[in-house]
Image (spheres, grey):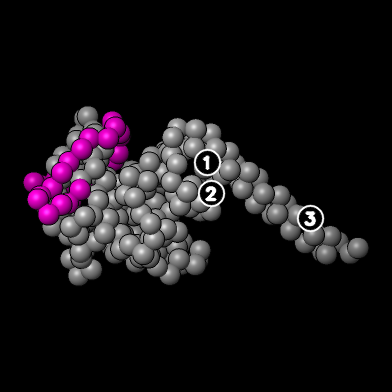
Amino acid sequence: MCRPLLLCVLLLSACREGTEDYARARERMVEEQIEARGIKDSLVLAAMRKVPRHLFVPERYRSEAYADHPLPIGYGQTISQPYIVAYMTEALRLKGGEKVLEIGTGSGYQAAVLAEIADSVFTIEIIPELAESARERLRRLGYKNIFVLCGDGYRGWPEHAPFDAIIVTAAPDHIPGPLVEQLKVGGRMVIPVGSVYQELFLVVKTERGVEKRPLLPVRFVPMTGEAQRR
């Protein structure tokens, strides 16, 4: 075999082995970090098994992509711990066919997990560089049902409201009124609230009003922009 052809064969083999290694790590992540902690929704588990988390983190952190902790993605932002992504997604109780709003695109990982279940995902990122890189990453991965907007997510995306579900991945110190307004009756929102101490809340919009229930203590980056001026 000539040397260039041999080199190509070796590179293809290494690439295939690397892909298989990530797939095994992803399966362990789901079994040990997510199922073992009580996540049962089959749609959520399937999405977590499918989305290649290692492609949503900077290359220098790819060896840690499936580890049980958040990772930096630049600009002072992070990609959430896998369990938290699964927990928040399960709390929305998606069944397929929903229109979902996400505030805080980051690298696009949470949006990709949502898009494996929902009909469409509208996601807003305030940092231009992250919005553009997420848009391009999601395009390369073939997600045609995710729509990325660069802007301040405090006021949501009224042009596409109302939403069946809303997920917020940055913490304001209060629940933004515009997001509640853009939630359908019967819709669910999951949002971290607080500054030094944060609590993850489930907000359900009913015919009688809004019900709020604390879920668990969390630690997210703060929501910037208008949220900080309120």
Mark 2 touches mark 3? (CB < 8 Å): no
Between 223 and 23, which is closer to the camera in this rendering?
23
How far, Cα to Cα, is label 2 from label 3?
28 Å
Q: Is residue 72 visible?
A: no
The percent coordinates of residue 226 (x first, y second) are: 14, 51
* Earlier sequence position, callout 3 versus callout 1: 3
Q: Nearer the viewer, mark 3 or mark 1?
A: 1
Q: From what the image shows, is residue 160 above or below residue 207?
A: below
The percent coordinates of residue 49 (x first, y second) are: 53, 49
- Whether residue 98 sits left or right of residue 73 in the image: it is left
- Label 2 sits on a secondary structure element that is helix
- Label 1 sits on a secondary structure element that is helix
Identify residue for label 3.
10
How far, Cα to Cα, is label 3 from label 1?
30 Å
* Earlier sequence position, callout 2 versus callout 3: 3
Tell me what residue is drawn at x 58 percent, y 43 percent: 27
Q: Which residues are magenta?
A: 204-230
The percent coordinates of residue 150 (x first, y second) are: 28, 62
Tell me what residue is drawn at x 55 percent, y 37 percent: 31
* Earlier sequence position, callout 1 versus callout 2: 1
The percent coordinates of residue 133 (x first, y second) are: 41, 60
